[in-house]
Image: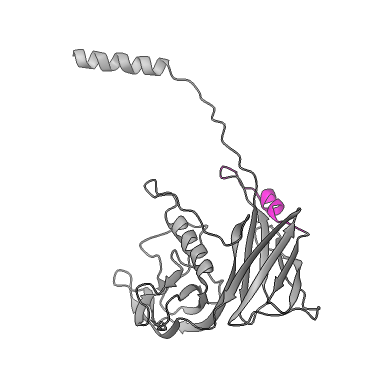
Amino acid sequence: MRIQTILLVCCCAWMSCEKDITVDLPQGEPQTVIEGTIVNDEYPEVILTRSFSYFSHISVDQLKDAFVHNAVITVSDGNSTMQLKEFSKDTTNRVKWYYYTADTTQPAAFKGKLNKSYTLRVAVDDQTFNAVTTIPGAGMVIDSTWSTIYSKDPTLARLWARITDPQERGNYVRYRTARNGGVYRPGINSTIDDQIVNGTSFNTQLDAGHDRTQEINFDTYGYFKRGDSVNVEFSNIDKATFDFWRSLDLAYASNGNVFASPIQVRGNISGALGYWGGYGARRLNVKIRK
């Protein structure tokens, strides 16, 4: 009885001391965010935005205001330099999407080529950012693909690939998949390196792409539906591009895990967030067994 009385008094005392506390959340300064890609046989594309505060409530108007306009962006292959032009396109969520790419009416416009390095230069608001990337000409290749039926749900299937890695070390890949003519999306882990499999042929799962704005159903994650037509984009990339996507995948996978260590996303653009990445892309179509 005495213990119960003491607990009751302590609870009443704690409740009487309760009061509202207002926390002044820190607002970080917006930073320039650069997402630049150059793919073999395609023109480069750069998306330029400003970062949001971690605690921001993001609205449609904020998304519209995030895009950075009137930047001077150039891409050089060491011999020729072209200035990119800003374009826009409409999206389904009422936000106009802005991006910079080659002005094909200009004679200096060029597409990415294998085994070449490209320098990106972005000048905006009295600041200049530079980065270099390479489009690998060789690396891992997909020898064959096949699918297996999911025992717990026979309407689903797993896609597999047999991949061969060259004898030379330092090969990196990023892959994405698209089903039935949809958009290409990465899985939770979208990268492969040859630290363990160097110079060998090995089997690996190719996960179905995941819309990262949606919750993950881990019971069905990574599976395709039987009969799906799947496009696979399998791209050899350089180390800096691999580091960016590898760290971003890890950050996404650990989001919401209170026991996970903080992960720094590793970009390759000094002074800005984001990356400039080259892709030696190969694409193939796979039919999932019915």
**Residue 267 visible in rendering:** yes
Question: Which quadrant of the figure has residue 153?
Answer: bottom left
Magenta stretch?
A: 54-69
Seen from this angle, which residue lies furthest left? 1
Which residue does the image show at 62% across and 63% down from the upper left?
A: 35
Which of the pair 18/33 is nearer the observer? 33
| Quadrant hosting residue 101 | bottom right
Identify the residue shown where x is 46% and y is 68%.
190
Question: Please, which colouring scheme is shown?
Answer: one colour
As drawn, which residue projects farthest toward the bottom?
143
| Residue at 56 percent of width and 42 percent of height | 55
Q: Is residue 179 visible?
A: no
Outermost residue toward the front? 78
Residue 288 x/y as whole percent? 42, 81
In this rendering, the answer to whether 276 lies above or below 9 is below
Q: Is residue 57 magenta?
A: yes
For this rendering, which residue is in front, 100 or 195? 195
Question: How far across and how far down the image is residue 53, in percent?
Answer: 60, 45
User: Looking at the figure, which quarter contains the C terminus?
Assistant: bottom left
Task: Give the x, y percent position of residue 273.
Answer: 60, 56
- Give above or below for 14 relative to 212: above
Residue at the (23%, 16%) spot, across then down: 4
Compare residues 220 and 105 and report the one nearer the observer: 105
Q: Where in the figure is residue 285, as x and y percent of width and height?
A: 50, 83
Task: Classify the position of the N terminus by image quarter.
Answer: top left
Counting every numbered tag in the picture gives 0
Query: From what the image shows, is residue 223 above or below residue 96?
Result: below
